[in-house]
Image (tube, grey):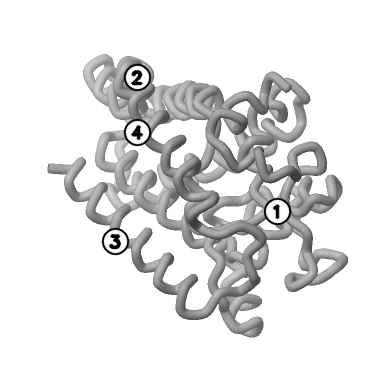
Amino acid sequence: MDIIIRISLFSGFLFLFILAEIWRPRRPRVYTRLKRWPSNFGIVILNNLMVRLLPWILPLRISVLAAEKGWGVLNWISIPIWLEFFIAILFMDLIIYGQHRLFHEFPFLLRIHRMHHTERDLDVTSALKFHPLEILISLLIKSTAVLILGLSMSQIIVFEVILNTMAMFNHANFFIPVPLDQKLRFLFVTPDMHRIHHSIDPWESSKNYGFNLSVWDYIFKSYLHEAKLGQEELVLGHNAFKKEKYTHILWQLRIPFL
């Protein structure tokens, strides 16, 4: 049942953000959807097939093991359920921020992560496009975090729904009035804020790592308010992979090894 709910929510928000992009896009496209989307969705399918083959590293499996063995901080203390959920979501969001920053700090990890940064157009499908090797490493990091904190299945599901929805939101190419965007940034990562992270400028792409809560970028001094060229003239992508051929899935999968 939880899988059906998660797929329904994912599909619903994906469709909603696609409609918003069609209705009022923030920026013009470099490539058509037909050029980019088959590759992006193909990578999603490939990643899901890989995960099916490696069920023992999934955070949900680890949470069951932690509950059976009594492992993890939340299994050692007694606090209200609402506080457990608050701690779980905050802790996991910090882990995702740290993971993202880690992928930019170490060259061998950046080689894997840079596939996500080859997008010359940023839209809702960009939030789904990560190399299978990055997905594998991310699962290991998340599972370790689940084990340390002793998260329950419901806490993991709620967090994953929030994370996926917010990732699609802040990668989406739809217009949000600037005054509203500025207010939202006090708590959440907005599309204009995250788009700066996808700048072709290496200094700008080393800012705004958050996917959900913006607080981590403020605390760890990685927040950048605006790109040098502004949102309309901001150039996205990666200097080494600007050619059209890199929109193809086979070239995308080769990127860490080029």
Q: Assign a secondary structure to mark 1.
A: loop
Q: Position of residue 134 (x, y in %)?
A: 55, 28
* Tag nearer the camera, 1 or 4: 1
Label 2 or label 3, whichever comes before in sequence order: 3
Q: Assign a secondary structure to mark 4.
A: loop
* Tag nearer the camera, 2 or 4: 4
- Which residue type does callout 3 highlight? Gly
Q: Which residue is mark 3?
A: 12
Quadrant in the picture for residue 115:
top right
Residue farthest toward the left in the current orientation of the protein? 1
Q: Which residue is mark 2?
A: 71
Q: Nearer the viewer, residue 83 or 110?
A: 110
Asked if marks 1 and 4 touch (Cβ < 8 Å), the reply is: no
Asked if marks 2 and 4 touch (Cβ < 8 Å), the reply is: no
Q: Which residue is mark 1?
A: 208
Please tell me which residue is depicted at 28% across the width and 34% down the height of the picture. Answer: 152
Q: Which residue is mark 4?
A: 151
Label 1 or label 2, whichever comes before in sequence order: 2
Q: Position of residue 81 (x, y in %)?
A: 27, 47
Whole-number angstrom distance, CA of label 3 to CA of label 4: 26 Å
